[in-house]
Image (cartoon, rainbow, N blue to C red):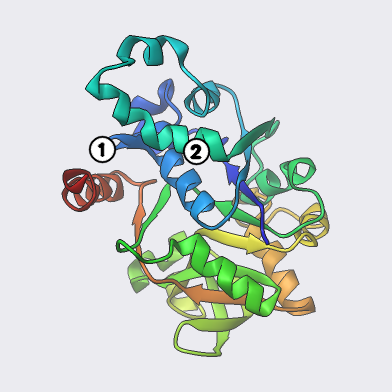
């Protein structure tokens, strides 16, 4: 059983300035919950109770969110507003939270490697909180779907979706052999290729299950696209040496790293989740 989930949360969120000058982008609220809250709920649904954050300067509000606020709880105790804390209390009662800094901003691969001491020698999940994934009521979360695949294949699993050609250069892209309608064995991966050089329209999104050998591969990965240590490059080496599966998940993903995607997610969650509470 996969017990731990890693969250790279050290980025600056510059596309949301000036809001993110003092507020981490992961703490931006989609209606009544910050993005990172949705991410931890998804991990818990998949059985991952131990949450490991690779963080940076000015991110203390993430730790504050996953802690008791005695002042607020005292103020609303015995009132109807107390019920508004039920969801965060569920996380606090069932999860643990650890934090380590990413001392240098060298890319997603470097951030994952920085979390090694919190993860140890076991398979683990990775969630990028600015990719908000929503499934229909009664359906498994995206990460829970991926855990089921890991239990079947016992190798790294990456989430993918079809992306329009004009947007493909913003993503890692797979070249894979179809195993079933929604599952591909990865043969190669390219980080942010030009549209006319992309091997497919299947883009990697911010959900991963990684086996622990990824850390040794990351340690030996040279800077790639953008001069950063790319997680995509290390996973590509995994695929060459063993097995990596890519999964077209069931659900809807919102790119909350962009303003348009964030607004779209807010409107969707308000109409389909918040109003039905």
- In the rendered structure, the answer to whether residue 158 lies left or right of residue 120 reads left
Determine the image quadrant of residue 239: bottom right
Query: How many C-alpha atoms fall within 10 Å of the one at disc 2: few (<14), some, or many (≥20)?
Result: some
Task: Work out how far the residue at label 1 is from the one at label 2, CA to CA, in angstroms.
Answer: 18 Å
In x, y percent, where is residue 71?
A: 42, 9
User: Taking 196 as reference, is 262 above or below it?
Assistant: above
- In the rendered structure, the answer to whether residue 44 lies left or right of residue 218 reads left
User: Which residue in the protein does label 1 denote?
Assistant: 31
Picture mark count: 2
- In the rendered structure, the answer to whether residue 111 lies left or right of residue 259 reads right
**Residue under the point 68% across and 51% down:** 229
Q: Which element type, helix, strand or loop, lies under badge 2?
A: helix
Q: Which element type, helix, strand or loop, lies under badge 1?
A: loop
Q: Quadrant of the N terminus?
A: bottom right
**Residue under the point 45% across and 64% down:** 169
Q: In which quarter of the image is the C terminus?
A: top left
User: Taking 45 as reference, is 188 above or below it?
Assistant: below
In x, y percent, where is residue 217?
A: 79, 60
Determine the image quadrant of residue 212: bottom right
Residue found at the far front of this picture: 78
In x, y percent, where is residue 232?
A: 63, 63
**Residue under the point 83% across and 57% down:** 216
Query: How many C-alpha atoms fall within 10 Å of the one at disc 1: few (<14), some, or many (≥20)?
Result: some
């Amino acid at each position: 059983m996969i017990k731990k989930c890693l969250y790279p949360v050290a980025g600056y969120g510059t596309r949301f300035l000036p809001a993110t000058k003092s507020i981490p982008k992961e703490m931006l609220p989609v209606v009544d919950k910050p993005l990172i809250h949705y991410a931890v709920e998804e991990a818990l649904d998949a059985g991952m109770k131990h949450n490991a954050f690779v963080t940076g300067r000015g991110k203390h509000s993430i730790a504050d969110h996953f802690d008791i606020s005695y002042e607020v709880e005292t103020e609303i105790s015995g009132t109807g507003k107390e019920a508004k804390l039920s969801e965060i209390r569920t996380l606090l009662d069932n999860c643990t939270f650890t934090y380590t800094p990413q001392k240098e901003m060298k890319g997603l691969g470097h951030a994952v490697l920085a979390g090694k001491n919190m993860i140890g020698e076991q398979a683990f999940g990775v969630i990028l909180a600015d990719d908000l994934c929503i499934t229909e009521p009664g359906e498994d979360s995206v990460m829970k779907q991926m855990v089921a695949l890991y239990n079947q294949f016992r190798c790294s699993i990456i989430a993918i979706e079809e992306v329009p050609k004009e947007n493909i250069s913003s993503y890692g892209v797979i070249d894979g052999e179809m195993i079933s309608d929604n599952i591909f064995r990865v043969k190669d991966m390219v980080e942010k290729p030009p549209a006319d050089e992309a091997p497919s329209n299947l883009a990697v999104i911010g959900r991963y299950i990684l086996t622990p050998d990824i850390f040794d591969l990351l340690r030996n990965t040279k800077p790639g696209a953008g001069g950063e240590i790319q997680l995509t490059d290390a996973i590509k080496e995994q695929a060459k040496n063993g097995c990596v599966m890519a999964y077209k998940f069931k659900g809807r993903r919102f790119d909350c790293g962009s303003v348009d995607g964030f607004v779209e997610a807010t409107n969707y969650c308000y109409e389909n989740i918040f109003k039905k509470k």
